[in-house]
Image (spheres, grey):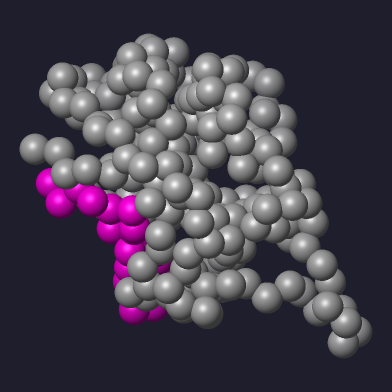
Amino acid sequence: MMRFTRLAAVATTTVVASALFAAPASAHGKTKPLGTKSLAAVLTADKSGFDHRGGDYDILTAAVLAVLKAKPSSQVKVLTDGKVALTAFLPDDRAFQKLVADLKNTKRLPSEKAAFTAVAGLGINTVESVLLYHVVPGATIDRKAALKADGASLKTAAGSSIKVDVYGHHWKRVKLIDADRSDRDPRVIRFDINKGNRQIAHGIDAVLRPINLP
């Protein structure tokens, strides 16, 4: 099976365009501070567990919890600290199912539980690195800022970068160009999860890949 290699997990404040930093909302001329609800709190609020809804984040949540259980001091822990500004891109369950099917070279999508088992089987260090590749520390990038960020390079908590590609004429869309040149790039399909807080997220339809896979 093809495997992700471990990337350096270096937390750093990195955004290559100042326009990406979303300004807090204003009310009556005063700046309204962003809230401190963490993305971990948002993810774990869903208690349903593995199900048949491909558009939620059960596999991602299980992966985050697995890393924190095995490595309590992992940089992934930043997702539990709502005081730390960051933007995360969240692959939904179907995205992980497609990844596993791709790695196993089959068109049949596994169940959510089977997909998580396969992902966990890559090794906790690999899972950690892949998760960190989905986190951009130091910046609260909302939909409005993202749509103005065409061509921007975002350095992730894994130490490597992803590129923002804004496309479309009448209806602007966003996709993220990762290190893998062999597969379709993930597209943002849901904006502004946890909006109004320092930690914000956007749902994507594929897993960002930190290395190029054949």
> Who's the residue at 53% across and 17% down the image?
70
Q: Picture quarter containing residue 104?
A: top left
- Residue 55 vs residue 40, the one in the foreground: 40
The reply to whether the magenta stretch includes residue 170 is yes
Q: Which residues are magenta?
A: 160-182
> Who's the residue at 47% across and 68% down the image?
15
Decide if residue 115 is on the left or right side of residue 21.
Answer: left
For the N terminus, give its image quadrant: top left
For the C terminus, give its image quadrant: top left
Answer yes or no: is residue 127 visible.
yes
Q: Residue furthest left?
A: 214
Coordinates of residue 198 in the picture (x, y in percent): 70, 58
Image: 30 above or below 22: below
> Who's the residue at 76% across and 74% down the image?
25
Answer yes or no: is residue 58 visible.
no
The reply to whether the magenta stretch includes residue 87 is no
Q: Picture quarter containing residue 129?
A: top left
Decide if residue 101 is on the left or right side of residue 127.
Answer: left
How many marks on residues? 0
Coordinates of residue 146 in the picture (x, y in percent): 49, 69
Q: Residue furthest bottom?
A: 29
Coordinates of residue 155 in the picture (x, y in percent): 40, 60
Image: 21 above or below 5: below
Coordinates of residue 100 in the picture (x, y in percent): 28, 24
Q: Residue furthest right?
A: 28
Decide if residue 62 is on the left or right side of residue 178.
Answer: right
Q: Picture quarter containing residue 130?
A: top left
> Who's the residue at 74% across and 52% down the image?
83
